[in-house]
Structure formats: C-alpha cells, structure tokens
C-alpha cells in the first residue's frame, strides 16, 4: 500500500452549497431568478425595470448569476439576453422557494391583488404547470394510478397509456440532462406539482390544444372553457383547481 505523504499536494471536489446560497442571499438577485422562471430570455434593461434597480447594478448581479451557473447568456446582435441555465436550475429555485419562509409585502391595488391570485392559481414554472392547478394535476394523476412512487415519482403503465390516448408523447426514456418524471415543491401551495420531461410535454399539450393560455410578459396561465372541460373529463379536477377565485390560499408563515 502506498504511503500517504502529508506534504503531497492533493485536491478534491465537494459541492459548495454556501456559494449557491450566497448567490440567492441578495433579494434583487433572487427576484431576477424568480422572474426568469417564466422560461424566457430577458435583457438586462428589462430585468432592471422589473427589479427597480439601476442598469449598472443589474449587470453586476447578472454577471454573478452567470458565473455561478444559475443563468446562461446569449448575444443577439448587440443585445445580451439571459435565461435560466436549464430545467434543473428552475426546479432548484422552485423547491427552494417552497421551503423559504413567507414575508409580508404590501398589496397596493385591486389589480395587484388579482395578479397575485392568478399567479397562485396557475402559472408556468419554466416549462411546466405550477400553482394550484399544477398541484391538482399531480394529486389527480396519483389518485388514478397514473403516477406511482419508486425511489421517486414514476409514470405507471396506466399513465403512459393515458398520455398516449391524449396524444402526448411521454418523452420516452430519460435524457441524460432531464429526468423523465419529477415533482417540484410548489411555493404557493407548498405541495408538489409535476415537472420533468413528462410535465413539460403535458404543458405543451395543454397550451397547443387551448386548455390554457399564457398571458404576455408574465408567468400567469388562464384555464379556458375548453380546458375546464378537458381537465374535468380527463382528471376530474374540482372547480377550485380551475378558477383563480377558488384557488387554494398559501399557508400563513
């Protein structure tokens, strides 16, 4: 056996959780990341306006988030765009938000109150459905035996047949960079919604068939009349999952 030489230089790698936490410890950077959960690409100017900070300050924050691996950047001509680095980054942010304590913020108008109610009801989480609607979908699929549990959530044979009957590709075997079926801890309801490749495919189907429509420049989804009919027929979703005024309120801190 080779003797260990204490003077020999040796380097090992270990996850630096503190570095990730430091990136999100600033509320402006956290707000930027939450805005980018819409799955889109934003300019620094758009994010500066959203976060109500100076463009130069926003650029500094974006540089840190890009170098830290949470965001990716691309150039389109002279403009710089940033987006979340991928679905894993989105799921990490949503899960962290689901574990975070609530803090009280002022609601200054009826329009803002309605916006928050709609956001809690149904929204995108990167490329899948979140909010009370997303949670209701997971619970209904589980009750009907379409989702099961092994070491984590799995699509059952009945679930695969259900997707095929809808005309939704079940995404086949998991790709190296994306889990087949995953769940995120929803930050508004604090229960699980469906993510992974299957969650993304189901959202695309709902969008393409007019079950939901996505509002411009926001993450909010609206369930259409056709969507209410489809979700009732396919999963037996109750009215509180289909109308924002009846959506489950988040728990108090």
Image (spheres, rainbow, N blue to C red):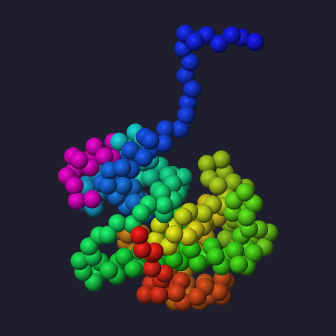
Can residue 9 be seen in this snapshot?
Answer: yes
Q: Position of residue 54 (x, y in %)?
A: 19, 52
Camera-nearest residue between 169 and 200: 200
Which residue is located at x 54 percent, y 64 percent? Answer: 185
Camera-nearest residue between 77 and 233: 233
Camera-nearest residue between 107 and 202: 107
Which residue is located at x 44 percent, y 44 percent? Answer: 20
Give the position of the C terminus as an image quadrant.
bottom left
Q: Is residue 54 magenta?
A: yes
Can residue 73 be seen in this snapshot?
Answer: no
Magenta segment boundaries in residue numbering: 51-63
Write down the quadrant of residue 234 in the picture: bottom right
Write down the quadrant of residue 226 in the picture: bottom right
Q: Position of residue 33 (x, y in %)?
A: 39, 55
Number of marks = 0
Q: Which residue sits furthest right?
A: 157
- 80 on left or right of 129: left
Q: Main secondary structure of the magenta part?
A: helix
Q: Position of residue 164 (x, y in %)?
A: 73, 72
Which residue is located at x 53 percent, y 38 percent? Answer: 15
In the displayed structure, would residue 249 be above or below residue 101? below
- 221 on left or right of 201: left
Give the position of the N terminus as an image quadrant.
top right
In the displayed structure, would residue 242 be above or below residue 70? below
């Amino acid at each position: 056996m080779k003797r260990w030489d204490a003077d020999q230089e040796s380097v090992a790698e270990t996850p630096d959780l503190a570095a990730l936490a430091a990136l999100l410890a600033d509320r402006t950077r956290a707000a930027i990341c939450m805005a980018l959960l819409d799955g889109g690409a934003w300019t620094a100017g758009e994010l500066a306006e959203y976060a109500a900070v100076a463009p130069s300050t926003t650029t500094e924050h974006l540089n840190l988030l890009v170098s830290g691996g949470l965001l990716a950047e691309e150039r389109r001509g002279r403009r710089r765009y940033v987006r979340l680095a991928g679905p894993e980054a989105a799921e990490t942010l949503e899960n962290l938000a689901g574990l975070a304590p609530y803090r009280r913020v002022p609601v200054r108008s009826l329009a803002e109150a309605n916006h928050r109610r709609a956001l809690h009801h149904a929204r995108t989480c990167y490329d899948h459905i979140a909010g009370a609607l997303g949670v209701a979908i997971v619970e209904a699929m589980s009750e009907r035996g379409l989702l099961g549990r092994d070491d984590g959530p799995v699509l059952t044979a009945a679930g695969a047949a259900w997707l095929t009957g809808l005309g939704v590709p079940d995404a086949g075997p998991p790709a190296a960079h994306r889990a087949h079926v995953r769940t995120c801890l929803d930050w508004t309801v604090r229960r699980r919604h469906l993510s992974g490749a299957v969650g993304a495919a189901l959202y695309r189907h709902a969008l393409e068939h007019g079950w939901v429509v996505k509002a411009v420049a926001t993450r909010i989804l609206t369930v259409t009349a056709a969507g209410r009919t489809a979700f009732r027929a396919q999963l037996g979703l109750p009215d509180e999952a289909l109308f924002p005024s009846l959506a489950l309120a988040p728990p108090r801190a």
